[in-house]
Amino acid sequence: MSNDSDSREYVIDVHELNKHFGDKHVVNNVSLRVARGQIFGFLGPNGSGKTTCIRLMCGLLTPDSGTGTCLGYDIRRDSAQIKRNVGYMTQRFSYWEDLTIRENLDFVARIYQMRNRRETVDKSLEALGLQSRANQMTGSLSGGWKQRLALAACMLHEPRLLLLDEPTAGVDPTARRDFWEELHRLAARGISVLVSTHYMDEAERCHKLAYIAYGKLLAQGTSKEVIESQDLATWSIQGEHLSELSEKLRATPGVDQTVVFGAALHASGRDHAALERAIRQATAGTTLRMEPIETGLEDVFIYLMSHSKDNFGAQT
């Protein structure tokens, strides 16, 4: 496939990106591709390099080494053109609380030097369901409405790519669900979305995922592909005294991980036969109920996090 056809097929196509801050290797040889109209989720512990990685891929930061394109533009040479076609929504709400929703959007439209500002703002208010609150002071809005305003603001200049840095942090579940429905509507229109999140239900709504820990890309693909890549078997155990059982199993060969999920204990391991033997021996003669289950995305991410090393070599 030629480079021209590659650039048309992939909104982002980056290879071996590296970034240091002092002696810390924040992004370590990261390569990935994002297709047009794709919601691509970034997961990983705090300080793992997710946000830095997203910024590098979109020309907002210059890599120490590595190459790539974003929206067909070179991430090193063409950062100004990339920025004109990208909408960036930070985790921290950064609009003016003493202005109304309409005034905030009008101010952003002025910054972009948009023609027909009033028409553009009206369209944005309608698209995000903000008309009824257009004249409400922003400081009085709930987290969900502020989030909707932030999305409207970063969509004003009709970007082809959205960068969302933990956009639903501190937002109630209903507002989170509505927000994700809006993201899927945007993706259906061909807009690509890069989003970092800590929520597993949100991760499962992404078309593809990347798990980054301490600068390294440990897994990427669809939710199903990420789960299968770790080849973990998982058993669910129900009954009493699960915390004590968890401690016992954790020290048993064949058991790589134990996590309590509500009323059940999940035990996972890569050696499927050894895992089953360990569980059957630990539960023999008890009233505990056990069964093999499909390994979930959260099981995999807990496993990845616990088996990754930080930038200074300390086990997390």
Image (cartoon, rainbow, N blue to C red):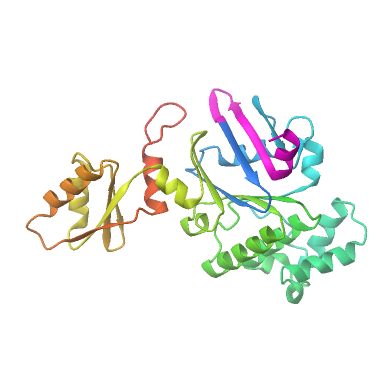
For the point 68% across and 51% down, the residue is: 192
Report if residue 85 is visible in the image: yes
For the N terminus, which image quadrant? top right
Q: Is residue 40 left or right of residue 252?
A: right
Magenta segment: does it hold 300? no
Residue 33 vs 92, above or below: the answer is above
Image quarter (top left, top right, bottom left or bottom right) of the C terminus: top left
In the image shown, does 260 or 298 lie closer to the viewer? 298
Residue at the (68%, 43%) spot, across then down: 10
Instruction: Residue 125 in the image: state x and y as whole percent.
Output: 77, 69
The majority secondary structure of the magenta stretch comes to strand
Question: In the figure, is residue 105 to the left or right of 206?
Answer: right
Quarter location, residue 84: top right
Query: Which residue occupies the foreground of this view, 149 or 183?
Result: 183
Give the side of residue 29 with respect to residue 225, left or right: right
Bounds of the magenta segment? 1-29
* Nearer-the-camera pick, 78 or 214: 78
Taking the view exactly as shown, the residue that stands out farthest to the bottom is 132
Q: Percent position (x, y) of residue 28?
A: 54, 29
Single out the residue that lies furthest toward the front. 1
State yes or no: residue 3 in magenta.
yes
Identify the residue at horizontal 56%, vertical 66% (top origin): 177
Give the x, y percent position of residue 230.
Answer: 38, 42
Residue drawn 38% across the image and 54% down it: 296
Give the image quarter of residue 11. Answer: top right
Q: Is residue 38 left or right of residue 118?
A: left
Image coordinates of residue 150 in percent, x first then y, are 70, 59
